[in-house]
Image (spheres, rainbow, N blue to C red):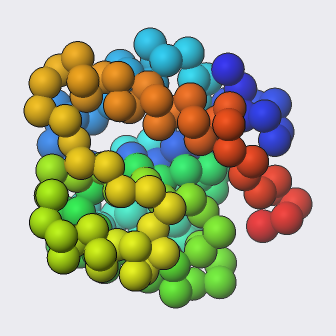
């Protein structure tokens, strides 16, 4: 399925430092039939460079959705989320926290920072795949996202 707003592949930025979770996410989105361009970065500084189009990320598209882990090197996901939601340029990009943290303080802080959704990574392979497929399906078939012109 294409991004309904633009009838093009969905642009997804995955901010994840675990190569295994990157591979699983890529496979789940493919199996979920979400037509997408998945870009990955493995730390918070690279995520912000991507989002602001700096350096090697200058010519890459603005993401329609960010999948963000909390526990990252350099800048953690909490810092990335705070900067995104505090920036007029970035705050309209939906952010889904996809993390292993079940800590109440992490969940509360993420929602205080205006995260769009908080999901704790499931432990088993099949459940992880199901959750990621449902994220793709929900964000690109159910939700209405802002069009490029409106951003």
Q: Is residue 35 visible?
A: yes
Q: Which residue is drawn at 52% across and 43% down?
A: 12
Quadrant of residue 59 in the image? bottom right
Residue 19, position as x, y percentages in the image:
18, 36
Q: Residue at x 46, y 29 (%)?
A: 134
Q: Is residue 58 visible?
A: no
Quadrant of residue 143 in the image? top right
Left or right side of 70 for 9: right
**Number of marks in picture:** 0
Q: In this view, does 116 lie above or below 143?
A: below
Q: In this view, does 113 lie above or below 48?
A: below
Quadrant of residue 37 in the image? top right
In the image shown, does 104 or 62 lie closer to the viewer? 104
On the rendered image, what quadrant is the N terminus found in?
Answer: top right
Left or right side of 69 for 53: right
Residue 109, position as x, y percentages in the image:
30, 79
Q: Which residue is drawn at 78% across and 67% down?
A: 151
Residue 146, position as x, y percentages in the image:
77, 57
């Amino acid at each position: 399925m294409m991004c309904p707003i633009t009838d093009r592949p969905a642009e997804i930025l995955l901010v994840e430092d675990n190569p295994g979770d990157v591979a699983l996410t890529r496979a789940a989105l493919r199996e979920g039939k979400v037509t997408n361009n998945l870009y990955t970065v493995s730390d918070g500084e690279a995520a912000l460079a991507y989002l602001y189009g700096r350096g090697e990320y200058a010519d890459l598209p603005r993401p329609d959705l960010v999948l963000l882990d909390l526990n990252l090197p350099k800048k953690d996901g909490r810092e990335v989320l705070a900067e995104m939601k505090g920036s007029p340029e970035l705050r309209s990009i939906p952010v889904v926290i996809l993390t292993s943290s079940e800590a109440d303080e992490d969940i509360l802080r993420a929602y205080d920072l205006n995260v769009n959704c908080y999901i704790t990574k499931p432990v088993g392979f099949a459940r992880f795949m199901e959750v990621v497929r449902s994220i793709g399906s929900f964000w690109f078939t159910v939700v209405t996202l802002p069009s490029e012109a409106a951003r």
